[in-house]
């Protein structure tokens, strides 16, 4: 059988990794796919850089993405340009040309997934996106196929390597945020715009995709609650350690009676959980299914070849299924289109979670009792407490309170009242806490 022909839109970090893995492992890949998978065209504006990757092979190099999309010889288009503007146009144009698409672009799918999947379904082509979530970890395959017997209850993941790398290096080496971010960029983990990483947006893109697959709902990035790590203070990382917790940027999506939670924020996790010990740029995703229980997926979530591993696996899948009846392929979001649900995404006020609170208070009699009274009045139960004298020798102290689970709206009201007390001297720090048991 003649090889399937691939065009790479973008040959930067991920595109280059894909090119190299396909070349290096071509015999194994052919054996698995049933036919060869060959890159015949690559595209980027810097033609010299593209030529440096393809070397003296007969791969055609172009700066015009439409030269690939309009080429009838190309069967599969791999999109690794990134972003939501040009990438959206190109992916839709490739689909319109009847080409299958493989993409690593989580931003594109989290925001425009519904439009793209619908266009692909109408045209009978596949859009594969394993690389879009957790890089080399085959989490899409696990959720969509391996766990298809289960009613998924929740997913919790460290799904941004850059922020996990930053948190780990800051904790272990006492390095400054900016220094570690630069290193993450040098290593190719960070997005073109690193604010997407550090503000939690990239993790929310990935979480949105996983949530849609797990619960059979449309991708709804605009409903996700997104908080990054830029406001995290070293004092809280330290206090969390003293209390037996680590702080991780977690993406959490959970089925509740009244809807689905979809949230990314720094989270205290018990230090003895495996996921709390995931360090550096590694990713890990916990999935709780009713039949299987808790499962954990761990590996490299970014970088040229780990991400290429996922892209090439998609290329193999698409090659195997290219001639299958489109109705017999795995649906993009795991559920058949007529079995999708309209379960709402919950607003943060309705989310249920536990909390770490740090209050800078005047060191006076009665202060603690006023605070605990407010919590009790809102039916918020205290799980643990720590008091630390302030280092500056003033009559102030840090009061750290761990609570049991409560509804966020209730906690917000309590926080408002506590913040208004004259003895609370600085903005209260609130970090959510999950036991992930
Ligand atoms: P890079 O910036 O390294 O690569 C992007 C490529 O697209 C470059 O070759 C660039 O070349 C090309 N490109 C950009 N604009 C155009 C254009 N107008 N016309 C033609 N080519 C263009 O990004 P990455 O490889 O890191 O990321 C690509 C995608 O993969 C993103 O969606 C990212 O989120 C995703 N991803 C990245 C991971 C990683 O570890 N890096 C991991 C998982 C997913 P030139 O500027 O010369 O045109
Ligand atoms: N910027 C992303 C990260 C790349 O740091 O995890 C992988 O999606």
Image: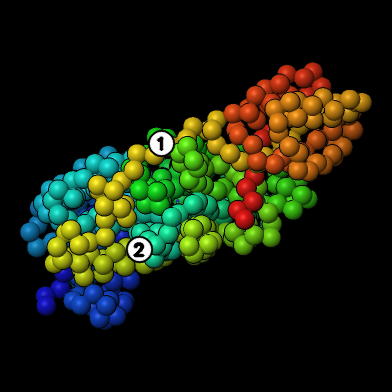
Q: Position of residue 372 (x, y in %)?
A: 79, 30
- Dot 1 falls on a residue whose secondary structure is loop
Tag count: 2
Work out which quarter of the rendered image holds the C terminus and state it: bottom right
| Cα–Cα gap, marks 2 and 1 | 24 Å
Q: What residue is drawn where x is 54% and y is 61%?
A: 294
Residue 236, located in which quarter of the rendered image?
A: top right
Image position of 326 (left or right of 308): left
Q: Tell me the residue that label 2 is attached to.
A: 145
Asked if one can make out residue 160 in the rendered structure from this viewpoint, the answer is no
How busy is the neighbourhood of tag 2: few (under 14 within 10 Å), some, or many (20 plus)?
Answer: few
**In the image, what residue occupies the spot 21% across and 45% down?**
118
Q: Is residue 179 above or below residue 343?
A: below
| Nearest the eye: 120 or 257 | 257
- Image position of 171 (left or right of 291): right
Q: What is the crowding at mark 1: few (fewer than 14 residues within 10 Å), some, or many (at least 20)?
A: few
Residue at mark 1: 344
Q: Residue at x 30, y 67 (%)?
A: 312
Residue 350 makes an appearance in the image:
yes
Q: Position of residue 375 (x, y in %)?
A: 74, 29
Mark toward the start of the polypeptide (2 vs 1): 2
Instruction: Report helix, strand or loop for mark 2.
Output: helix
| Horizontal and vertical percent position of residue 17 | 35, 65
- Confirm if mark 1 falls within 8 A of ligand 2: no
């Amino acid at each position: 059988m003649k090889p399937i022909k691939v065009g790479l839109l973008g040959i930067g970090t991920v595109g280059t990794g894909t090119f190299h893995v396909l070349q290096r492992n071509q015999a194994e890949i052919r054996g698995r796919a049933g036919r060869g998978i060959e890159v015949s065209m690559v595209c980027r504006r810097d033609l010299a850089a593209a030529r440096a990757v393809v070397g003296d092979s007969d791969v055609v190099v172009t700066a015009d993405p439409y030269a690939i999309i309009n080429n009838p010889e190309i069967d599969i288009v791999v999109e690794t340009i990134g972003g939501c503007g040009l990438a959206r146009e190109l992916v839709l144009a490739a689909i319109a040309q009847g080409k299958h698409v493989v993409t690593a672009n989580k931003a594109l799918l989290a925001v425009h997934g519904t439009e793209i999947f619908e266009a692909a379904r109408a045209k009978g082509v596949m859009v594969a996106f394993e690389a879009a979530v957790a890089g080399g970890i085959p989490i899409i395959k696990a959720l969509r196929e391996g766990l298809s017997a289960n009613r998924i209850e929740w997913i919790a993941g460290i799904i941004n390597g850059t922020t996990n790398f930053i948190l780990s290096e800051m904790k272990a080496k006492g390095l400054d945020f900016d220094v570690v971010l630069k290193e993450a960029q040098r290593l190719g983990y960070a997005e073109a715009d690193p604010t997407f990483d550090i503000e939690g947006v990239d993790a929310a893109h990935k979480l949105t995709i996983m949530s849609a697959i797990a619960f059979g709902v449309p991708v709804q990035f605009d409903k996700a609650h997104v908080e990054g790590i830029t406001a995290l203070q070293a004092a809280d990382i330290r206090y969390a350690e003293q209390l037996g917790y680590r702080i991780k940027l977690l993406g959490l999506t959970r089925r509740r009676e009244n809807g689905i939670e979809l949230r990314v924020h720094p989270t205290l996790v018990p230090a003895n959980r495996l996921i709390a010990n995931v360090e550096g740029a590694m990713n890990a995703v916990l999935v709780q299914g009713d039949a299987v229980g808790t499962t954990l997926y761990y590996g490299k979530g970014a970088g040229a070849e780990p991400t290429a591993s996922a892209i090439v696996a998609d290329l193999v899948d698409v090659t195997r299924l290219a001639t299958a009846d489109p109705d017999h392929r795995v649906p993009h979001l795991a559920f058949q289109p007529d079995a999708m649900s309209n379960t709402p995404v919950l607003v943060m006020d309705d989310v249920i979670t536990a909390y770490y609170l740090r209050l800078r208070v005047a060191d006076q009699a009665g202060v603690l009792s006023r605070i605990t009274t407010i919590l009790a009045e809102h039916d918020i139960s205290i799980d643990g407490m720590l008091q630390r004298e302030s280092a500056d020798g003033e009559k102030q102290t840090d009061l750290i309170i761990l609570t049991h689970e409560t509804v966020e709206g209730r906690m917000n009201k309590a926080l408002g009242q506590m913040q208004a007390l004259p003895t609370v001297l600085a903005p209260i720090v609130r970090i959510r806490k999950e036991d992930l048991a």
